[in-house]
Amino acid sequence: MTGLRERKKQQTYDALSEAAIALFLKHGYDEVTVNDIAAAADVSKPTLFKYFASKEDLVMHRILDHLGEPARIVAATTAPPVDVLREHFFQGLAAREPTTGLNDHPQVLAYYKLVFTTPALATRLREFADDDEKTLSDVLGGSLAAELLAAQLLSTRRILAYRNWLALSTGRTAAQRFPAATAEADEAFARIQPLRSRLH
Amino acid sequence: MTGLRERKKQQTYDALSEAAIALFLKHGYDEVTVNDIAAAADVSKPTLFKYFASKEDLVMHRILDHLGEPARIVAATTAPPVDVLREHFFQGLAAREPTTGLNDHPQVLAYYKLVFTTPALATRLREFADDDEKTLSDVLGGSLAAELLAAQLLSTRRILAYRNWLALSTGRTAAQRFPAATAEADEAFARIQPLRSRLH
DNA sequence: CCAAAAGATTAACTCGGTCAATCTTTTGCC
DNA sequence: GGCAAAAGATTGACCGAGTTAATCTTTTGG
């Protein structure tokens, strides 16, 4: 049963997240204090930290949902990992998934600009990538080749997505960028040598 | 002329760094406050921050010296980047360079254990790697292929070095690990496709 | 409708990091 | 050699992120 309590909790969560992102976009991450955010959402500072582990997480929780995704995708099939992740990336491009960098909604662009241009947030993003690399490497068997491949796959994804975002943030539309985005993805994934064996 | 001022400055710098690392190794990074370190070196907290930009830098300044090294090495020659960096890594292995992970001096091992097992320091290490990746990518021309290659080269180095450190930190000597270290380096660098052109 | 538990609030605290003001040392000049 | 001014070092006071313990409010199961 979805009690009143749960609904209120959800409301507070959303109020904090939305207030935080709005304030960060307006004044800049470093210029807004957690007290400002707590006040905007009508809660106290300790309450804010009950909902979000850190100031950064007020922004990053959206991306946090995708943590471990590459490993899950690879673990879900028996097809070669490179093929699976390339295919997944192309589907993401076609669907204009924000994680591919090819979503040109102003809100999405502004959100990623905030993340990429705020050092603390960019660092946090890389921490997520490191976690993804570790879990993917484990799924691939943990060998030297697995570690190398996991790192290469994730840096490929990251570089492609960033280049797409950069193109859109300098005025291009997603539709305009799409051909180059697929061409670059083709080129990048073609550079990756597949894993000989996936067993440990 | 090497004035009194400069000598004193160097003394304070060394006193802070040595006190910090000794205290961190003894009690753990998070259990030592910057006030403890300042007190141990007989200076005030603001003075400490004149010498080191952050608590993390009290540990990381040693590694900071190597920042931008891959880019410099590649820029210094006209030989293919992959060959140059592979060669440099093998020379590092032979010389037991700490950055290759193949130095088994207890102090060096303890230092890297501190860095690798302290989240804040490990994160900082990755920030350095990101900077190296950016500068190397620029030297390689800044194209998509350059970005991909820079990322692959640096993650290769990182993964090889970490595996070497792991072997030594579980009891092996550098001499015992050396054959496997070179074999793994061979395998890893062989996986890297060279850059077709280095021009922009 | 009530007792117990879950959650929110507040005040006070710790720690990393910064700043304005003060004090010390070096140096250029006579 | 001595002195004034500039350069640099030092410090106490402060700010913001994050935590903790005690208190208070609200919800919900019986």
Image (tube, coloured by chain):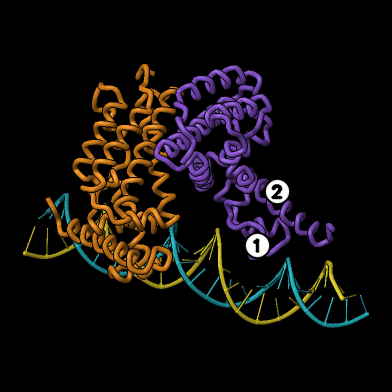
Chain colours: A purple, B orange, C cyan, D yellow
Q: In this figure, which residue is indicated by the disc labeled 1?
A: A50
* Mark 1 crowd level (few <14, some 14–19, many ≥20, 10 Å Cα): few
Tell me where residue C2 appears, x and y as whole percent: 88, 82
Which amino acid lies under the numbered mark 1 shown in the image of this protein?
Lys
The answer to whether one can see residue B59 in this image is yes
Image quadrant where one finds the N terminus of chain A: bottom right
Residue A80 in the image: above or below residue B46:
above
Q: Nearer the viewer, residue A131 or D19?
A: A131
Tag 2 residue: A18
**Category of crowding for the residue at label 2, using alpha-carbon neighbours closer than 10 angstroms: few (below 14), some (14–19), many (at least 20):** some
Q: Residue C20, image x and y in percent?
A: 43, 61
Task: Tell if the residue under mark 1 belongs to the same chain as the one under mark 2.
Answer: yes
Q: Residue visible at 76% across and 59% down?
A: A9
Q: Chain of mark 2?
A: A
Residues at marks 1 and 2 touching, judged by CB atoms closer than 8 Å? no
Kind of residue indicated by mark 2: Glu
Left or right: residue A129 compared with residue A43: left
Kindly report the distance in space between the C-alpha atoms of the residues bearing marks 1 and 2: 16 Å
Frontmost of labels 1 and 2 is: 1
Residue at image position (40%, 28%) is B149
Label 2 residue SS: helix
Q: Secondary structure at mark 1?
A: helix
Q: Which of the two discs, 1 and 2, labels the residue nearer the N terminus?
A: 2
Residue at 60% from the left image edge and 37% from the top image edge: A73
Q: Position of residue B153 (x, y in %)?
A: 37, 32
Residue A32 x, y percent position in the rendering: 60, 52
Along the line of sight, which residue is nearer the eye, D8 or A17?
A: A17
Residue A104, label in figure: none
User: Compared with residue A153, is residue B80 higher up or lower down, i.e. above or below?
Assistant: above
Report the residue at 48% width, 21% height from top: A190
